[in-house]
Amino acid sequence: MSLPLEGLSAIVTGAGRGLGRAEALELARLGAAVVVNDYGQPGRDGSGEASTGPAEEVAAEIREAGGKALAHTGDVADFQQAGRLVELAISEFGKLDILVNNAGILRDRMVFSMSEEEWDAVIRVQLKGHFNTTRFAAAHWRERSKAAGGPVYGRIVNTSSEAFLAGSAGQPNYAAAKGAIVGLTTSTALALAKYGVTANAICPRARTRMTEDVFAGLERPANGLDPLAPEHVAPLVGYLAAPAAARINGQLLVVHGGMVAIVERPRVRAKFDSKQETFTYDELDALLTAHYAQRPQGETFGAAEVLGLKRE
């Protein structure tokens, strides 16, 4: 029986642990040859010595199950190393078909206490890391499409977060990077559609070392699969990477615990027109103050409204 990703090759960044590991295993289970990328630093803040261990272990796990995989331990936030990652997939498997960007770090701090270095470090790994691999993969697909004289196969799955949708008070750097990743995704989707490539983003909710504080009060069930297990997220990534998802492009999907929600693009909530050539302060005061007076003070416009879900 053929597998949906048979004959395709994939890169998964940050795949040595947590979500990335689950995603790499799922892509391999569906038939893809996988380059498992992980810089291997032990700290979720990007601290500690880089190590080949996590990436090598996941690649070995895939091979032991009968799949094809190799490890790459470079830093995707480094432009040249990201280029070499894409080159590795192409040289080993003949081409690159799927790119899953998952690598990230945390440097949590309230905005009034955050240092420049804490801001830069998260933006570098989360956002620049997504851009770097996307840039080289996109160039590869564009060249292949020109040589073929038509569309080729290409899939990008980026990792955003509900922190950008609903806000996260102690994560201004993380929330900003995850919001920017959505912008990168939609721009990439438009740019690469004519080459046959799709780009989508997910907002996963899962229990990993990155979220150990967030879900500290939610205990794992005694029996059955943890509702916050990364394995709930991986099947959606596998699907978005597959031929069946060819019509899905430039989309944002929230996924966790057996639930997938498609996020609608922002819509205009209310519209006001000036009664003269341009607005005056008094007119804006009368219109907007009255409008916002109908809502609770301090209420934000985030995930609950965008998703039509109550924030948990």
Image: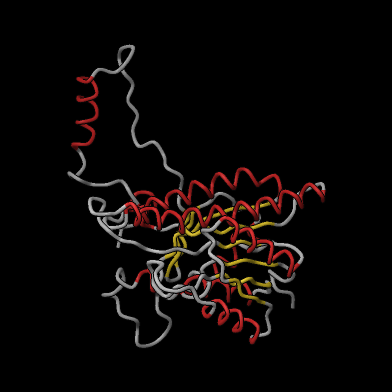
As rendered, which of 4 and 34 lies closer to the eye? Answer: 34
Quarter where residue 175 is shown: bottom left
x and y percent of residue 197 in the render? Answer: 66, 52
Residue at the extreme front of the image, as rendered: 49
Determine if residue 208 is in view: no
Tell how many labels: 0
Quick check: 4 left or right of 216?
A: right
Quick check: 50 left or right of 120?
A: right
Residue in the image at 65% along x and 76% along y: 70
x and y percent of residue 219 in the render? Answer: 30, 80
105 to 21, vertically: above or below:
above
Residue at the extreme right of the image, as rendered: 148
Determine if residue 6 is in view: yes
As rendered, which of 43 and 146 lies closer to the eye? Answer: 43
Quick check: 80 left or right of 46?
A: right
x and y percent of residue 24 in the render? Answer: 58, 73
23 to 149, vertically: above or below:
below
Q: How are the colours assigned in the image?
A: secondary structure
Residue in the image at 48% along x and 51% along y: 181
Quarter where residue 237 is shown: bottom right
311 to 54, vertically: above or below:
above
As rendered, which of 268 and 164 lies closer to the eye? Answer: 164
| Quadrant for the C terminus in the image | bottom left
x and y percent of residue 142 in the render? Answer: 72, 48
| Quadrant for the N terminus in the image | bottom right
Quick check: 47 left or right of 12?
A: left
Quarter where residue 228 is shown: bottom left
Residue in the image at 45% along x and 74% along y: 49
